[in-house]
Image (spheres, rainbow, N blue to C red):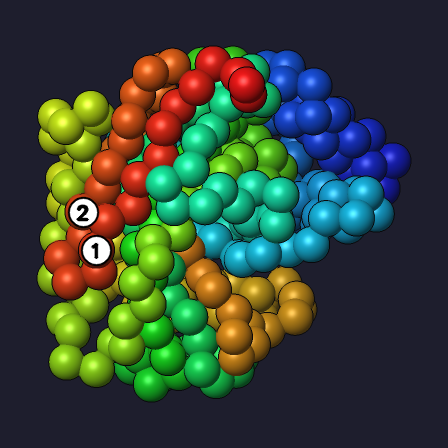
Amino acid sequence: MANVADIQSIARFLHNAEKERREVTSIAAEYPDLTVEDAYRIQDEIVRLKRAEGHQVYAPKMGLTSQAKMKQMNVKEPIYGYIFDYMVVPNGGEIYLDELIHPKVEAEIAFVLGKDLAGPDVTAEQVLEATSHIVPVLEIIDSRYKDFKFTLTDVIADNTSSSRVVFGNRLRKPDGVELDLIGATMAFNGEIKALGATAAVLGHPANSIAMLANMLARRKQQPLKAGDVILSGGITEAIMLTAGDYVSARFDSLGEVTFAVKASRG
Ligand code: OOG
Ligand code: MG
């Protein structure tokens, strides 16, 4: 177990890398004994630093929940992290490359809870029973590590590459929707670059939310609450963004999510 001083200094280092849009090299290479629990303690400290700067947690997220993502990132275990209020971009809005390092985009669905959901032993059935709505999402990830090269502990410590997120306008009740068979396409300037279905996420995206509830319980963190919006993880691999891209994702029965990529504001 790493000591508190190391946890705090690594957290500040990664938090500043995000603010200064500076890419860094692997923490795990420098601290080879870092455990997964250490990495989550670094992430907890980043959450604390952001709150101290006046930011609020907007949504918990799961990551690396599909084979496509695990294969792309060469990390074989789902992880969780947090989206903050300052990361939210309106549907149809813009993102600015000079505020980011090397962003990529991925399509996901988010669950909105109508009931609290506390682990351990939460099942996918309980997740479905607790879900009030689902909403489509484009998540913009921006690992602080050079070339998106990271280990499991690296990416957990880096708050799972959280950077920006665009939610769709259409909230849908889950009743009568096969939540594992929601198809999605993601196009760049009208050309489809990635497509998939929600079953790519651990066989059914409700499994991802159940896993989060159980991971939070294992770490004795605050459980998921009614009203929480939770990202279940990328369906397809993530695709690099460049200035001039217009990204549009279409989700079966959930509508469209779009944003434009600009070099800078104004
Ligand atoms: C880590 C973030 C993963 C997802 O949906 O799989 C993630 C990364 O790939 O940089 O958000
Ligand atoms: Mg994601």
In contact (CB < 8 Å): disc 1 and disc 2: yes
Q: Examine the image and state in which quarter residue 105 appears.
A: top left
On the image, numbered disc 2 is attached to which residue? 250
Q: Residue at x 33, y 67 (%)?
A: 171
> What is the x, y in percent for residue 248?
24, 37
Disc with the residue nearer the chain's start (1 vs 2)? 2
Q: Residue at x 28, y 31 (%)?
A: 247
The CA span between labels 1 and 2 is 6 Å
Q: Nearer the viewer, residue 224 or 79?
A: 224
Q: Secondary structure at mark 2?
A: strand
Q: Nearer the viewer, residue 250 or 69?
A: 250
Mark 1 Cα shell of 10 Å, populated few (<14), some (14-19), many (≥20) = some
Which residue type carries mark 1? Gly
Q: Residue at x 50, y 23 (%)?
A: 96
Answer with left or right where residue 218 lies relative to residue 128. right
Which residue type carries mark 2? Arg
Q: Residue at x 66, y 32 (%)?
A: 33
On the image, numbered disc 1 is attached to which residue? 255
> What is the x, y in percent for residue 17?
68, 22
Q: Nearer the viewer, residue 31 or 70?
A: 70
Answer with left or right where residue 67 lies relative to residue 150. left
